[in-house]
């Protein structure tokens, strides 16, 4: 908006002074007019630059604030998740706390991270465990039914009796890392190794 206003004002000043300079005027009048025109142009350019700088700084401060909030919130959540995985049991109180964490993190998380968080929490609610191998046959059927109802266009694929659509703790952690910008497309092998390491840590705790 300010840039457009500056352009319009600049064109108007140019047209005005074009008519002004077309007349026979004393040298001092021309010098005064030229100095005034230069000052106006300088003010316009400075105003445009200052507004652009202010917008850039505001955007940067906002991004830094969101990032810091993410780091703090994700760190607190992972600490809570670590406490849950120690005993391996998920009770009703912990489920309520998981739901609370999901709502809180959705305020700062990106779309993909929010979706993975919600998937993880819902499978806890339905299957009553974060590890597929520890779920009962009844709860597995409940989760498969919930998944089919929620995502009718998708089909659950199994590899070695493990559903690929199941969100593991390793998947969740890597998604949060990616949401913080710590994972890039060139780190696919590192991502896979880290995920396997997390799964191994959980398996033997």
Image (tube, rainbow, N blue to C red):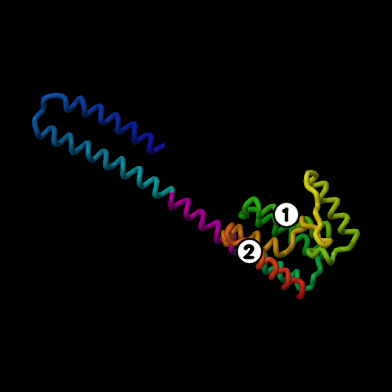
Q: Is residue 6 left or right of residue 192?
A: left
Main SS class of the magenta portion in the image? helix
Q: Is residue 27 above or below residue 161?
A: above
Residue at 36 percent across and 47 percent down: it is 50
In this view, the residue in front, 166 or 118, is 166
Badge 2: few (under 14), some or many (20 or more) residues near its Cα, within 10 Å? few
Camera-near label (1 vs 2) is 2
Q: Residue at x 86, y 51 (%)?
A: 145
**Distance (Cα) linking label 1 and label 2:** 26 Å
Q: Is residue 19 visible?
A: yes
Q: Residue at x 84, y 61 (%)?
A: 161
Question: Which label's residue is closer to the chain start, 1 or 2?
Answer: 1
Q: Is residue 28 magenta?
A: no
Numbered label attached to residue 118: 1
Residue at disc 1, secondary structure: helix
Residue 98 locus on image (x, y percent): 74, 60
Compared with 26, 108 (above or below) is: below
Q: Quadrant of residue 79?
A: bottom right
Which residue is more in the foreground, 179 or 100? 179
Q: Which residue is mark 2?
A: 189
Describe the element under mark 2 as helix, strand or loop. helix
Residue 69 found in image quarter: bottom right
The quadrant holding residue 203 is: bottom right
In magenta stretch: residue 58: yes
Q: Position of residue 28 (x, y in %)?
A: 10, 35
Magenta region, residue range: 56-71
Q: Is residue 27 left or right of residue 128?
A: left
């Amino acid at each position: 908006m300010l840039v457009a206003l500056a352009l319009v004002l600049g064109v108007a000043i140019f047209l005005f002074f074009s008519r002004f300079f077309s007349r026979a005027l004393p040298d001092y009048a021309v010098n005064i007019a030229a100095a005034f025109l230069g000052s106006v142009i300088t003010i316009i350019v400075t105003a445009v630059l200052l507004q652009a700088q202010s917008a850039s700084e505001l955007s940067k401060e906002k991004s830094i604030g969101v990032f810091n909030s993410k780091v703090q919130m994700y760190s607190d959540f992972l600490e809570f998740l670590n406490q849950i995985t120690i005993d391996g049991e998920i009770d009703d109180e912990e489920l309520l706390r998981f739901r609370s964490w999901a709502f809180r993190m959705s305020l700062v998380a990106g779309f993909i991270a929010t979706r993975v968080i919600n998937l993880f929490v819902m499978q806890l609610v339905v299957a009553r465990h974060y590890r597929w191998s520890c779920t009962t046959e009844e709860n597995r059927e409940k989760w498969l039914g919930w998944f089919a109802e929620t995502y009718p266009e998708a089909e659950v694929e199994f590899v070695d009796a493990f559903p690929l659509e199941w969100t593991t703790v390793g998947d969740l952690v890597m998604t949060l890392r990616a949401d913080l910008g710590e994972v890039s497309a060139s780190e696919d092998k590192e991502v896979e190794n880290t995920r396997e390491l997390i799964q191994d840590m959980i398996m033997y705790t």
